[in-house]
Amino acid sequence: MSAPVAISLHSVSRFETGAGNPILNAVSAEFKKGQLIALVGADGAGKTTLMRVMAGLLKPQEGSVQFFGRELYTQELNQLQTLCGYMPQQFGLYTDLSVGENLTLYADLFGLSDIERKNRFEQLLKMTGLSAFTDRPAGKLSGGMKQKLGLACALLNRPQILLLDEPTVGVDPLSRKELWTILKDSVKSGDMTIVVATTYMDEASLCDDVVIIENGEVVLHDSPEAIARLAQGLCFNLLVPRGEKMRELQALLLDDIEEVLDAVPQAGKIRLLLKEASDREAIEKKYAVRLDLA
């Protein structure tokens, strides 16, 4: 039996104020219950705007959003928002409060009972590996630990839908791996649907479903395996020239939207996904680099 649809997007559009240029252009997609979904795109592709629309924070100017078949932007908005946890890029942790105090604050906001919050705190602290740090101020946590605390706060009220906007940006590789282990474990029961916005195709490969967004439009929506097959012959490894800074070169490549779909640092190299195989020569010439087929 097929899983029910948790999130439905129907021709969702948002436009720039004044100019009228589309930030989101007729975005349509369906995400099933119990799936881990990657929303992939470069900076400025429209990921954050779409996440805010799905979180009930930014009403679409055209189109509609449904949670489990119910229209989100109606009189039911507040009720439906309780089904959803949202962790933006800059999650609202209180740096002068301890880990435990941050959890208590969010438990108060969610209206959790004393018994329920005690059980949830224990579960989430164990899951995120923060049990030994409950008295540490959030401002003194590492980047990875802050993201884990933000995730724990977003999960406190047991949401059926969880939206995470680039949760691994600025996170060390080990914490990044641990965060993804938590996400994969969270969908195993089949009760939660998680949508993760990311710029990294290697993170997308860990998901059940992948949506690639470019200039506010869905350009591809399929399984990671199907997308990998489509990408055969379009993936290249770039050895960073001596004296070049990897992150700066990656940023330049990601800005090269005419030819580059994705650029991910990987073991001293940058893994490139090009739009066309014929773009290889142009990239090599433009950046004075050599690309090897991945």
Image (cartoon, rainbow, N blue to C red):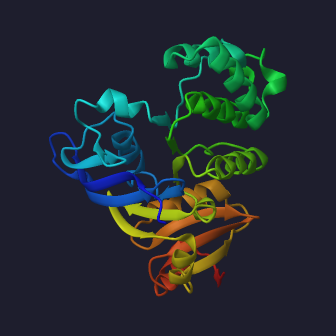
Where is residue 184 drawn, in percent x and y? Answer: 66, 53
> Residue 74: percent from the left, percent from the top?
22, 34
Q: In which quarter of the image is residue 32?
A: bottom left
19 sits left or right of 96 in the view:
left
Instruction: Please tell me which residue lies in front, 33 or 169.
Output: 33
Q: Which residue is drawn at 38% across and 59% down?
A: 30
Check the picture and name the quadrant holding the C terminus. Answer: bottom right
Identify which residue, 108 or 1, lies in the foreground.
1
Left or right, residue 237 beside residue 197: right
Q: Nearer the viewer, residue 19 or 115?
A: 115
On the image, the x and y values in percent for residue 49 come to 36, 44
214 in relation to 104, above or below: below
- Snapshot quadrant of residue 81: top left
- At a point 61% along the width and 30% down the height, the residue shown is 150
Along the viewing direction, whichever of 183 and 178 lies nearer the viewer: 183
Residue at image position (64%, 46%) is 186
